Image (spheres, helix red, strand yellow):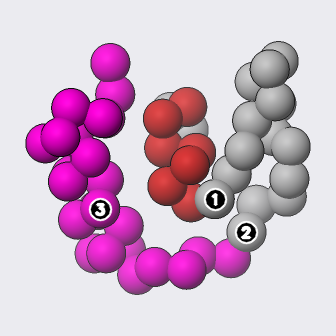
């Protein structure tokens, strides 16, 4: 998984890039997740 996407699904990473918490159940549908991710990209907050 790309690091910038971790926050989209509620995953936190520690300073050594490992997962801090177990993977959560999805809180958004796939179309909602893609729409949110695209909005971040358009605002310049997506991958660099």
Horizontal arrangement in the rendering, residue 29 relative to residue 15 (left or right): left
From the top left corner, tell me how far across and down residue 12 is, in percent. Answer: 72, 44
Name the quarter where the C terminus is drawn. Answer: top left
Horizontal arrangement in the rendering, residue 3 relative to residue 14 (left or right): left
Callout 2 touching callout 3 (CB < 8 Å): no
Q: CA distance from mark 1 to mark 3?
A: 13 Å
Residue beneath label 2, please? 24
Name the quarter where the N terminus is drawn. Answer: top right
Above-or-below relation of 25 to 9: below
Residue 41 falls within the magenta-colored stretch: yes
Front one among 16 and 1: 16
Mark sitting on residue 36? 3
Residue beneath label 1, please? 10
- Looking at marks 1 and 3 on the same chain, the residue that comes earlier in the sequence is marked by 1
State the SS at label 3.
helix
User: Looking at the image, which residue is at 26% across and 46% down?
Assistant: 40
Above-or-below relation of 29 to 7: below
User: Looking at the image, which residue is at 56% across and 60% down?
Assistant: 9
- Circle 1 packing at 10 Å, graded few (<14), some (14-19), many (20+), is some
Q: CA distance from mark 2 to mark 3?
A: 18 Å
- Magenta residue span: 25-48
- The image quarter containing residue 24 is bottom right
From the top left corner, tell me how far across and down residue 43 is, in percent. Answer: 17, 40
Q: CA distance from mark 2 to mark 1?
A: 7 Å
- Circle 3 packing at 10 Å, graded few (<14), some (14-19), many (20+), is some
Horizontal arrangement in the rendering, residue 21 relative to residue 9 (left or right): right
């Amino acid at each position: 998984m790309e690091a910038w996407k971790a926050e989209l699904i509620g995953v936190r990473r520690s300073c050594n890039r490992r997962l801090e918490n177990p993977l959560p159940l999805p809180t958004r549908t796939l179309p909602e997740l893609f729409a949110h991710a695209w909005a971040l990209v358009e605002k310049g907050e997506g991958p660099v």
